[in-house]
Amino acid sequence: MRTLILLCFVAGLTACAGRVPDISVDATKYDVQIERDRWGIPHIHGKTDADTAFGFAYAQAEDGWELIEETLPFYRGESARYNGKDAAPADYMIQWLGVRDWVNAGYENQISPEARALVQAYTDGLNHFAAKHPHRVTRDILPVTTTDIITGFVVRHLLFYGFDGSVKEVMGPERAREVSRLVADLGLSDTPIGSNAIAVSPAATDDGATRLMINSHQPTDGPVAWYEAHISSDEGLDIMGGTFPGSPLISLGFNHDIAWGVTVNKPDLVDIFVLEINPDNEDQYRLDGQWLDLEVSEASLRVKLWGPLYWTVKREIYRSKHGPVMKTDHGTYAFRFGGQNEIRQVDQWYALNRARTFDEWYAAMAQHRFASFNFVFADKEGTIAFVHNSLTPRRKPGYDWSQYLPGDRSDLIWDSYLPFQQLPQVVRPKYGYLASTNQTPFQVAVADDNPDPSAFSPTDGYQARMTNRADRALELFAALRPISAEDFWTIKHDKAYAVSSRAGHYIRAAIAAELTDALPHHLQAQALLAQWDLVADIQSREAALGVCVIRAEWRAEQDAVAPPEAGGVLQACADELLEVSGRIDPLWGEINRHTRGPVNVPIGGGPDTLRAIYGTGYEENGYLTNIAGDGLYYLVAWNAEQKLSVQGVHHYGSATMLEDSAHYADQAEDFAAERLHAPLFDAQERAAAGNVRSYRP
């Protein structure tokens, strides 16, 4: 024991013995009540918005303190201190970007006083919970600070559009792309994944209703799995939906008057410049014919070795006029990217959470502080809208901005973004239909309701891809219009691959392929695939083989590489199925499973279907375990009399980390069986449903 205490002293650990510092908060200054409904979902009501944020933090911590605790070291650039050397590159990236420096420099004068009060109350709620529950705190990470929360907003936004992928590319063993020179023209590019948001207005429904599907795809577990809550206050805040642990606001959801869904987009927001380094001074670079000094600072990476022992590693950080700089064996590169030095995301989320009309919501969107994300909106008035939001740089025309850029010209260092109003948008489409499923923003509606791609510069870097979900949704809309409530439910839970999609083409290529060294089961598999109706239903005997084949094409498309030869993939899938399942045609419901605690049930759908299910673990378990895709989702509607109705379901339950909670898996079977329920938005609904528990933090 004496040795351990000495090691803790040497390592400088304030909580080595499990002690929690004094972080007590005067909770009596916050007037807030938490009400748990029959599903355990928290409905938090405060006198002020800040009071609500305090209670929201406490409720999140009750259900998943461990997830919040897990993210804090990452946002601080200190993950290696707890997780060892494998986490050091992520720590270096956070410190190299300087995000916490942006936050500390701009917090007081860039973020509104109202948002600062909200964030302060939220951190007080987290620290209050930790002080009351020291047994749940396993790391010396306290206190939680406002810098942690704002840094979380910034970093999540960068990672969602794939900034880290550009860093990993440059850190590779050789230069990955050419250096751009003047060219005549460019195409559109990039490949996001995940999420559906589909809206129909009275122009497209059979009963004059307005409907919105809120269906953002996330991992089923972890710090960016959906957490469901309802927050309201006497100041007018009243919104229910999904968020991530560590956020004081709702990310997507609904109130009595409006609703919105969010999908990931990945326009080209990262520009990488190749710097010319002075052969006589490695810390100088050429710009406009002059040698300029790189700014030099130092990253301090504290790396866990064993037990309480640590090693501190120092690494230099460089910056140029462009932004952060990375030195590699194949060159020196500077980065400039959408969202650089932007810390005001919390103000925009706050405005969205308070909006009650389309004009208020659109004004909140026009704050234009999110680096990316598509938004699909609907309201009780029958308005629907799509916004392909991004902080798209104003780039100098004539260069291929999808390649690396010459770093010696200051006129290529952009300093502004396209105005919000110039982004691809569709408001009140005449055909009454919008589908955002991570496809190109120029094919989200019908015919001339779509934005005109010729109105945008090739240097803007909008993606050109179509997803199966986009092809299938547009196909269903054409077949079903006008759309009933039952039709809308069917679209959400559709499990088919469109004949016209990339997946459909790849399946036909596998059916037509000349198989090399074919064994009898390979030929049987090819014949089986020819019988498939392209539907991943739990009763299908072709879907296990078909989805296996499609997955190869889907993965290749995500990696922006050519798909493997379809015939070879078919043979490999047949071999795998025969080895693991003993047959090439097991029921899809035997292979595709939704699991949580004691729950292990069949689930339909598959990669890139509208019922999006992404599984893993087949070789180890003999079945695929659902790990991402559909999670918390809602079907929101206002009838012709503007009366709100909502149905939804969470993929697990409200207790994200507490395995002994009644709400750890109480929605899992309903989720797999596609049984939705009212989210108990109104107090009268909660009382009628019973099992309501109310308390103060």
Image (cartoon, rainbow, N blue to C red):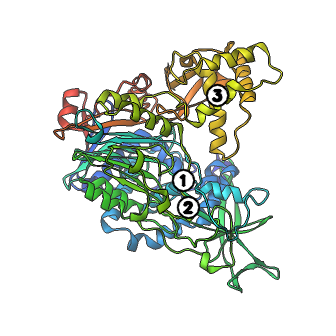
Q: Are marks 1 and 3 in contact (CB under 8 Å)?
A: no
| Residue 269, label in figure | 2
Q: Secondary structure at mark 3?
A: helix
CA gap between label 3 and label 2 equals 35 Å
Going 23% across and 56% down the picture, which residue do you hit? 48
The disc labelled 2 sits on which kind of residue? Leu
Mark 2 in CB contact with mark 1 (< 8 angstroms): yes
Tell me the crowding category of disc 2: few under 14, some 14 to 19, or many 20 or more residues within 10 angstroms, Cα based. many
Q: Image check: 15 left or right of 697?
A: right
Q: Earlier in the sequence, mark 1 or mark 3?
A: 1
Q: Amino acid at mark 3?
A: Arg
Which of the two residues, 137 or 290, is positioned nearer the viewer here?
A: 290
The residue to which callout 1 is attached is 266
Q: Which mark is residue 508?
A: 3
Which percent across, then down, holds residue 8? 63, 53
User: In the shown orientation, is residue 647 left or right of residue 682?
Assistant: right
Q: Report the amino acid beneath label 1.
A: Lys
Relative to residue 76, is residue 653 depicted above or below?
above
